[in-house]
Amino acid sequence: MTVQKDTFKTIVKPSPEVLFKDRGSKFIGYAFPVTSEEEIKEHLRQLKKQHHNARHWCYAWQLGEQYEKYRANDDGEPSNSAGMPIYGQLQSFDVTRILVVVVRYFGGTKLGVGGLIQAYKTAAQFALEASMIVERTIDDDFLLRFDYPEMNTVMRIIKDEDLTIKHQKMEMDCEITISIRKNNSERIYQVFENIYKVNIKKL
């Protein structure tokens, strides 16, 4: 049986601003943790306000725990000279839930496509190197329902298996929402499923 990858890498907070210069042009790099396209749009809006005199705001982003969604944007630079080099760094650092933006102030000298690729790649690399990258597990959430007398049994399994409780309601009829690392979720599901009077449902 092949074990699926159930971890992903991301950053926990925005990177400090980083700067790369080439022949008068300034390339300012930023990395942001993001979970939606709305957040991405908001960060781009803020940067365009902050750097309203800049020439280009090129970026790449990747979303999804399985790295399933991504986009690269050249924002007026020659095709594939900005967005893709930035995206290449996201792949190189193996990160998701992230937006990297490189803001360019034109310095009067054209850099050519090769120069642009190198500059955008380097600024993105600097931003990622300045970020705190962490590894997270991909988890499945389950709802447990049971009567109060079953409490000790349920809590013992949660403790023994080191499961995360996300929400709990402890009354005569109890409900607990737990989070289980993906590769363990089927096994743990069976453990609870086999307990008489405990109902488990995947959320």
Image: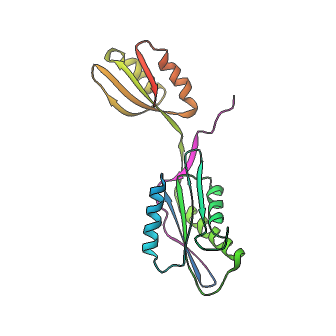
Q: Residue 151: in sight, yes or no? A: no
Residue 43 lies, in percent from the top left, at 45, 63
44 w.r.t. 35: above or below: below
Query: Which residue corresponds to the image point at 30% horizontal and 25% vertical from the top-left?
Result: 170
Residue 152 lies, in percent from the top left, at 37, 18
159 w.r.t. 95: above or below: above
Q: Residue furthest top?
A: 196
76 w.r.t. 177: above or below: below
Left or right of 201 on screen, residue 86: right
Residue 35 lies, in percent from the top left, at 48, 51
| Magenta stretch holds residue 14 | yes
Figure disc tally: 0
Q: Residue furthest right?
A: 114
Q: Residue 29: in sight, yes or no? A: yes
Query: Which residue corresponds to the image point at 43% horizontal and 62% vertical from the top-left?
Result: 42
Quadrant where the N terminus is found in the figure? top right
Residue 32 lies, in percent from the top left, at 49, 60
The magenta-colored residue range is 1-21
Quadrant where the C terminus is found in the figure? top left
Q: Residue furthest left?
A: 171
| Magenta stretch holds residue 148 | no
Query: Which residue corresponds to the image point at 36% horizontal and 33% vertical from the top-left?
Result: 167
Q: Nearer the viewer, residue 202 or 159?
A: 202
